[in-house]
Amino acid sequence: MLTLTIVLDSNEYIFGLSEQLKPSTSLLKNLSGCIIKLPRFILDELHDNLEEILLKKLYRLINNAKIEIIEEQIPAFLIEKYQKQLPAEDAVIAGYCELLKVDVLISENRHFLVDFHPKAFKILDAQNFLNIYMEK
């Protein structure tokens, strides 16, 4: 099986851990075979948005799935590169994906990026990721 390096947007963790969205929940249960990178700014956002019981589930997931927390700061030139096409927060996550040589960014709320096709990585929602890479 192909080993993919992925970044999950904060909404994937929120929807999956709280079981609000079935594809996100399925995704979090099927991360084997993936290298998962978790930039610190996404982890900080999760701390701001998850109640304590879900934070405990998050840290179990981080330990069990061997999710790598990335402390490295993103170089300004990468943010600037993507700010030409994206809002600031999205430019940061896109820059991280390129910096970390990610294959796929998985997100549920990046629908306005439909016309944005970076050369460095793909952008998929959880269901499409599962359909393409996991359910074969």
Image (spheres, grey):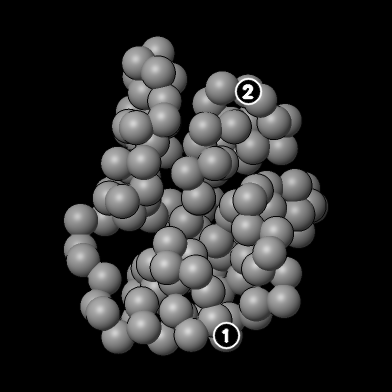
User: Please, is residue 12 above or below residue 52 in the view?
Assistant: below
Q: Residues within 10 Å of mark 1 (few under 14, many from 20)?
A: few
Question: Amino acid type of disc 1?
Answer: Lys
Please provide percent x and percent y for residue 84: 48, 85
Residue 51 appears in the rendering: yes
Q: Residue at x 40, y 13 (%)?
A: 53
CA–CA distance in space, label 1 to label 2: 32 Å
Please provide percent x and percent y for residue 15: 59, 32
88 lies left or right of 41: right
24 or 10, nearer to the observer: 10
114 lies left or right of 65: right
Badge 1 element: loop
- The mark nearer the N terminus, 1 or 2, is 2
User: Please, is residue 128 above or below residue 19 in the view?
Assistant: below
75 or 88, nearer to the observer: 88
21 lies left or right of 42: right
Please provide percent x and percent y for residue 42: 37, 48
Q: Residue at x 75, y 54 (%)?
A: 128
User: Please, is residue 34 above or below residue 87 in the view?
Assistant: above
Q: Which residue is mark 2?
A: 19
Q: Residues within 10 Å of mark 2 (few under 14, many from 20)?
A: few
Q: Which residue is mark 1?
A: 119
Question: Amino acid type of disc 2?
Answer: Glu
Q: Residue at x 20, y 63 (%)?
A: 72
85 or 1, nearer to the observer: 85
